[in-house]
Amino acid sequence: MESGGLLLWALPSALLLALLLQLSPRLRFRAKVLSYCALCLMASALTAPACLLWNGGRTVENMRIIKNVVRSFKYLYGLRFDVKGLEHFQVEGPCVIVSNHQSVLDMMGLMEILPDRCVQIGKRELLYFGSVGLIMYLGGVIFINRKSTSNAKSVMSGVGQAMTTDNVKVWIYPEGTRNGNGDLLPFKKGAFHLAIQTQVPVIPVVYSSFTTFYNPEKNLFTSGRIRVEVLPPIHTSGMTATDVTELCDTCYTTMRETFFRLSGTARRVNGSTPHLAQ
Ligand SMILES: CCCCCCCC/C=C\CCCCCCCC(=O)SCCNC(=O)CCNC(=O)[C@H](O)C(C)(C)COP(=O)(O)OP(=O)(O)OC[C@H]1O[C@@H](n2cnc3c(N)ncnc32)[C@H](O)[C@@H]1OP(=O)(O)O
Ligand SMILES: CCCCCCCC/C=C\CCCCCCCC(=O)OC[C@@H](O)COP(=O)(O)O
């Protein structure tokens, strides 16, 4: 009786769902994104106890465990990363790594190349994403309140202290938000203030555009290849607060050129940089 009921309801429901997914690209796209979220939530829930048992609590050491788990996700989604310039990460001591931010999939690209003893800066809201928030907390992610510049600035000056005393690298998305439109947003300045205040190098990292395989507007989420380039460190020793804007603009220009080169797209607006034109 039990198994008869299962066949009567579960089988047709599964068939109907499969049919709907075939018919509706939007639904198929949403299902795939949802599966990614579910995977992250599940993997975090399973990895959090491992982090607690291994390392006791919130520490950058947990990033190694998280990284090893996340690095397997790419096989499920058919993503490939071609990485160049990893040798540039071999700097002694702390540094500020800046990279472009296109979507939630960036987390895979991040973990693909994350150097040892490196934490990220993330928006405070991520703390409330259930087990994902917990795993980020355990990995040492620094949370900032983007709505309050003064609060974010004071958190970030505390980070400078910790970077030198605990020898940690910091990964920042200077665009400050996700952006998948095939260009870079103007950079916020926090990362560059931090690098100059702590007198540590800035290492830019660029990921090629996802638009050919991931595009929410076109309901596109297929397998794909991502080109990644770690650029040479930019040293900040001797720079002062007056050099922040120039450092920021140099990074922006270099990263934008690299982004277009890696993505195989032409520069927009006659090659002018809207950020500098403002
Ligand atoms: C096991 C399985 C696991 C699976 C699950 C996954 C787990 C994975 C675990 C771990 C992965 C973690 C992944 C995390 C990913 C997170 C991504 C995000 O959340 S991205 C959003 C947050 N990130 C940012 O927002 C960037 C940093 N933002 C900044 O640096 C901004 O500059 C900020 C917030 C500090 C201020 O932003 P403003 O919007 O006010 O803009 P401004 O133009 O930069 O600043 C205004 C003025 O303040 C000055 N200013 C800024 N910072 C300063 C400072 N530190 N000192 C002095 N002045 C400063 C500037 O110079 C500017 O002034 P003048 O225009 O130049 O006159
Ligand atoms: C019990 C609570 C259930 C909550 C369900 C939430 C499910 C979310 C689960 C997994 C998503 C994987 C997250 C990986 C972390 C990537 C971080 C990220 O890319 O966040 C976006 C942020 O950079 C920029 O934010 P906005 O573009 O300004 O917005």
Image: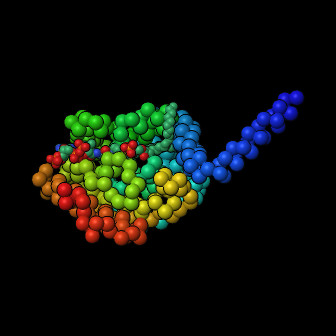
Residue 42 lies left or right of residue 189; in this view the side is right
Q: Position of residue 133 (x, y in %)?
A: 45, 36
37 or 84, which lies in front?
37
Which residue corresponds to the image point at 24% horizontal and 63% vertical from the top-left?
Answer: 273
Q: Position of residue 28 (x, y in %)?
A: 60, 49
Quadrant of the displayed image that contains ligand 1? top left
**To which quarter of the image does residue 13 belong?**
top right
Question: How many dots with numbers?
Answer: 0
Residue 75 lies left or right of residue 156; in this view the side is right
Q: Is residue 115 visible?
A: no
**To which quarter of the image does residue 10 belong?**
top right
Q: Is residue 38 visible?
A: yes
Which residue corresponds to the image point at 47% horizontal and 66% vertical from the top-left?
Answer: 82
Which residue corresponds to the image point at 30% horizontal and 51% vertical from the top-left?
Answer: 174
Q: Position of residue 147 (x, y in %)?
A: 28, 36
Vertical relation: 42 (above or below) 231: above
Q: Position of residue 176 (x, y in %)?
A: 32, 47
Which residue corresponds to the image point at 23% horizontal and 49% vertical from the top-left?
Answer: 189
